[in-house]
Image (cartoon, coloured by chain):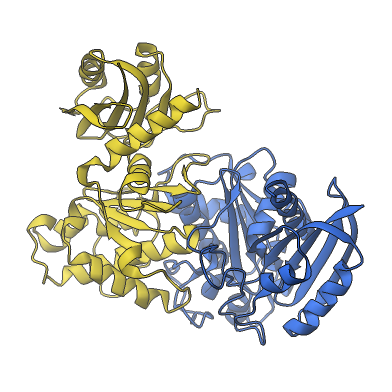
Chain colours: A yellow, B blue
Amino acid sequence: MEYYGSIEAGGTKFVCAVADEDLQIVERISLPTTLPEETLAQVFAFFDAYQLKALGVGSFGPIDVNRQSSTYGYITSTPKLGWKNVDFLGALKKRYDIPIAWTTDVNAAAYGEMHLGAGKNTQSCIYLTVGTGVGGGAVVNGDVLQGFSHPEMGHISVARHPDDTLESTCPYHSHCLEGLAAGPALEKRTGVKGQLLEGTHDVWAIEAFYLAQALMNYTLILSPEKIILGGGVMKQQHLFPKIRESLVKQLGGYVELPDLEEYIVGCDLGDNSGTMGCLLLAKEQESLK
Amino acid sequence: MEYYGSIEAGGTKFVCAVADEDLQIVERISLPTTLPEETLAQVFAFFDAYQLKALGVGSFGPIDVNRQSSTYGYITSTPKLGWKNVDFLGALKKRYDIPIAWTTDVNAAAYGEMHLGAGKNTQSCIYLTVGTGVGGGAVVNGDVLQGFSHPEMGHISVARHPDDTLESTCPYHSHCLEGLAAGPALEKRTGVKGQLLEGTHDVWAIEAFYLAQALMNYTLILSPEKIILGGGVMKQQHLFPKIRESLVKQLGGYVELPDLEEYIVGCDLGDNSGTMGCLLLAKEQESLK
């Protein structure tokens, strides 16, 4: 029997899975992300036990998704030790002579959620993960969003909250979303890790303000049918109504939004968004063969 | 002989054109936008002289582009006298029983430029017009960008320039791009109309800062292969290098950009971007029949 394979390659762990024709997962493992040779050896050991017909990869980035580029398939400028300028897709293609889909981890998650999760019955969505960093992927007209490169929507510029003087935690930007609203910013503001903060803490108003501002800009630029929020920070469920409320306030009635309870939602697939997206992309890639 | 028709419906004028199979324009007129019945009567009088096989419409907005909506094809919440909640597409369909493509004026311009102008040989681009207002459209993976609605990227939130205290000219937002960088903001800052301002005026640094910030956010969210700038304000050619320079500074090296001279460019089709886009969309719509 032939299987579809999935690699959700994160900066801290790799989740690999194989699934049958109906995308039912047969086996799934999680590996720590160490050095490329070491991690890839474990990835190969896992997949070598199966006859694969296609593979889908959703990788941490930045990655090169431009098919015209000489470094297509590479992880490019990551600070992650050993992974800079690694020909990830090339290594996989060398090992497995099968169709391989290649995109970012968050694009894969957006694709998975759109087809099988919170975005079912839509043709477009954004998936934003808010945790140690902020990353976003999107699907537009049914296809993963890529252009000259892939989205990096966690680093958009945001206007500061009038009461906020925090120095951005982003080494690149003095006022980007990630630098002012990811986990490290929450901890820097309060001295407490985000997951341990009470829902009543004042800091959540500032957090909601930044996330809502970003969602407003995503909405005005992409007009997605659904915005799906995941990641560690979004485990704080009380953030959802705060974000919706702040979005309405900041937008000032300029655009008529869909029902906000339906528009800004959590993940349906939990930790499986990326894996299911990779499997779907693998299946699609195979059908293009 | 049968023709393709184009309506570029703007808030101040309507440009109507008919073209042959090769999209060579046969006749073209410009009408002032007055009241709907009056303007539409002139539009009908123009097209009635031709046998049309399809029509493409790029309209000022906001418009309803959601096919599931009961007001699909309407101009919705415009302040333009008489045009609020007008069933524009419905009126056209009643008159002409042919395929009609329906999108925003700026989406049509983006589509025209991508196929025949500055975006040739790409599959994605943004078209931004900076004039009395700021409006943007986009093409992604070859298709016009629409989701629950259409882009309204002129109203994204921007962080203020440290030296800027101007009260936003946008009635909805205290710090959106249009409110701080459209023609009226330029005039409010200087007391002089934008087109009369010298290229050496200090105000252009602020103008370039805001436009570059917006382009940075569009880039991080959409990753288009090309950004095409048009409209009255962009007739000031010296703005292009200023915007490119400010973009590089604000992005802080986080993402590797395409060659900026190729990435941020003016229109190739001049005043014809929208018309050519509408004709292309008409032809495409006909082929879907």
Q: Examine the rendering and report whether any part of residue B4 can be seen.
A: yes
For the point 52% across and 73% down, which residue is it?
A: B180
Name the foreground residue: B63 vs B251: B63
Name the foreground residue: B266 vs A213: A213
Q: Position of residue B71 (x, y in %)?
A: 56, 73
Q: Position of residue B262 (x, y in %)?
A: 64, 42
Asked if B168 appears above or below A260 in the picture, the reply is below
For the point 78% across and 66% down, which residue is it?
A: B96
- Choose top left, top right, bottom left or bottom right for residue B103: bottom right
Q: Position of residue B98 (x, y in %)?
A: 75, 59
Q: Position of residue B201 (x, y in %)?
A: 64, 69
Name the foreground residue: A119 vs B9: A119
Asked if A158 appears above or below A145 in the picture, the reply is below
For the point 45% across and 68% down, which residue is it?
A: B161
Asked if B26 appears above or below A33 in the picture, the reply is below
Q: Examine the rendering and report whether any part of residue A72 can be seen.
A: no
- Choose top left, top right, bottom left or bottom right for residue B28: bottom right
Asked if A111 appears above or below A236 in the picture, the reply is above
Answer with left or right where residue B132 lies relative to residue A144: right
- The N terminus of chain A: image quadrant: top left
